[in-house]
Amino acid sequence: MKPLFLIIIVAMAWGSLKAQTDNGATEEGIVTGILTFDMLGNNPDFSWFHEGAAAYEPDAAAVAYLAQQLTNHDLVIFMGTWCEDSQRLIPQLYKILREIKYPAGQVQLYGLDRSKQSADGLHEAYKIEWVPTIIITQNGKELGRIVETVRESMEADLVGICRQQ
């Protein structure tokens, strides 16, 4: 009985440690650390990424405005690959960015664990409490954020932040 109990405890501890590794997928579909949209799109566990982007139809007028204005800003994005809100909103954001030909070098994308933390503590520097959190910056200064949900739509909320400058 004791050996079986010990095996169960060791297996549970191993699974917990495995879920916390940086830039590695686990059987639970959690990827942490620095990410790219390509990493999300190429991961067979994340069918939600391409499905969500394909299903989303952003407002054309808002997208046209963002094509002119958003490229003057940088994006810092915190998400959870395990999070339903991230699985819904990040593909929408990706589709908009792809449509406006937003430079990939202006996006910093980070995957957080279930406790919304990063191994390097970056979540603390940006005061992340909810995912996804999409931070729009200009010249290193934060202009606004979209946190966990949108008020109107992804593109309308981005337009609103860009207009605040």
Image (tube, helix red, strand yellow):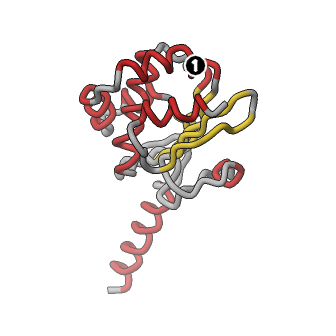
- Occupied quadrant, residue 117: bottom right
Query: Which one is in front, 165 or 88?
Result: 165
Q: Which residue is mark 1?
A: 69
Query: Which one is in front, 17 or 58?
Result: 58
Query: Which one is in front, 71 or 37?
Result: 71
Q: Which residue is rendered at x = 44% and y = 25% of the image?
A: 38
Q: What's under tag 1, amino acid-wise?
A: Gln
Q: Which residue is rendered at x = 44% and y = 33% of the image?
A: 156
Residue 151 lies, in percent from the top left, at 42, 45
Query: Relative to 158, is 104 above or below?
Result: above
Query: Relative to 54, is 134 above or below?
Result: below
- The N terminus - image quarter: bottom left
- Occupied quadrant, residue 76: top right
Element type at mark 1: helix
Q: Which residue is rendered at x = 50% and y = 15% of the image?
A: 67
Left or right: 36 with respect to 85?
right
- Occupied quadrant, residue 49: top left
Residue 51 lies, in percent from the top left, at 25, 31
Left or right: 55 with respect to 58?
left
Query: Relative to 83, is 115 above or below?
Result: below
Left or right: 17 with respect to 84?
right
Residue 40 lies, in percent from the top left, at 41, 32
Query: Which one is in front, 96 or 39?
Result: 96
- The C terminus - image quarter: top right
Residue 58 lies, in percent from the top left, at 34, 26
Q: Which residue is rendered at x = 49% and y = 18% of the image?
A: 65
Query: Relative to 30, is 13 above or below?
Result: below
The crowding category of the residue bearing disc 1, from other C-alpha atoms within 10 Å (few below 14, some 14 to 19, many at least 20), is: some
